[in-house]
Image (spheres, helix red, strand yellow):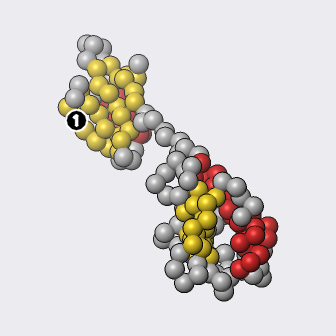
Amino acid sequence: MLTFEDKLALIEEFPELTRKDVSLNRVNFHFEDSLYEKTTVVYHLHPNGNGFVYTGNLPGYEANPKGLVNIRDFNRDELLTVIRASIDHLATEEEVVPPVEQLWKDAEGHSLILLEEDDRWNIYAGDNLEDSFGGYDEAALYLREEGFRRR
């Protein structure tokens, strides 16, 4: 197990982190260039070797509800890897997936918009919500049954 001093030395190898001493001889390290409100990468590193690294919802880490992983028993490579993952996570803009929007028309020229919103498939006539479905297949079936085709 790494000592407090070992962990400090490893963490200080990351020039993008800023050290902030806090109460009870604990130390935090912040990533000031974070794209998010969250800047803390290392939280409450304690002289007894306990401490946490922010991983948010990154796969491969069992984080607590605040997105923190306990690093008490981490070895050198594990500690370096989790800190790099945390910094990369805070430096990467989250991919925003645009909603799926489809135009459907009938033989008479009427048009409806099928739009995916908040895990629902909503059908709009202009600004008016006409119907809402739990799945795409269900919404598309309804539109086809009403004489609409995707354009």
| Residue 58 in view in this figure | no
| Residue 103 in view in this figure | yes
Residue 99 percent location from the top left of the image: 42, 36
Q: Quadrant of the N terminus?
A: bottom right
Residue 81 percent location from the top left of the image: 73, 62
In the rendered image, which quarter is residue 3 located in? bottom right
For badge 1, the amino acid type reads Leu
43 relative to 73, above or below: above
Residue farthest along the bottom direction in this orientation: 48
Could you say which is closer to the camera, residue 66 or residue 29? 29
In the image, what residue occupies the spot 36% across and 46% down? 118
Residue 69 percent location from the top left of the image: 60, 71
Could you say which is closer to the camera, residue 131 or residue 35? 35
Residue 25 percent location from the top left of the image: 59, 81
Q: Quadrant of the C terminus?
A: top left
In the image, what residue occupies the spot 55% across and 44% down? 93
In the image, 13: left or right of 143?
right
Residue farthest along the top direction in this orientation: 108
Say how many tags the image has: 1
150 relative to 25, above or below: above
In the image, 70: left or right of 14?
left
How would you rate the neighbour count of disc 1 (Cα within 10 Å): few for under 14, some for 14-19, many for 20 or more? few
144 relative to 14, above or below: above
In the image, what residue occupies the spot 53% across and 66% down? 67
Task: Find disc 1 in the rendering and name its residue.
Answer: 129
In the rendered image, which quarter is residue 142 located in? top left
SS for tag 1? strand
In the image, 74: left or right of 58?
right
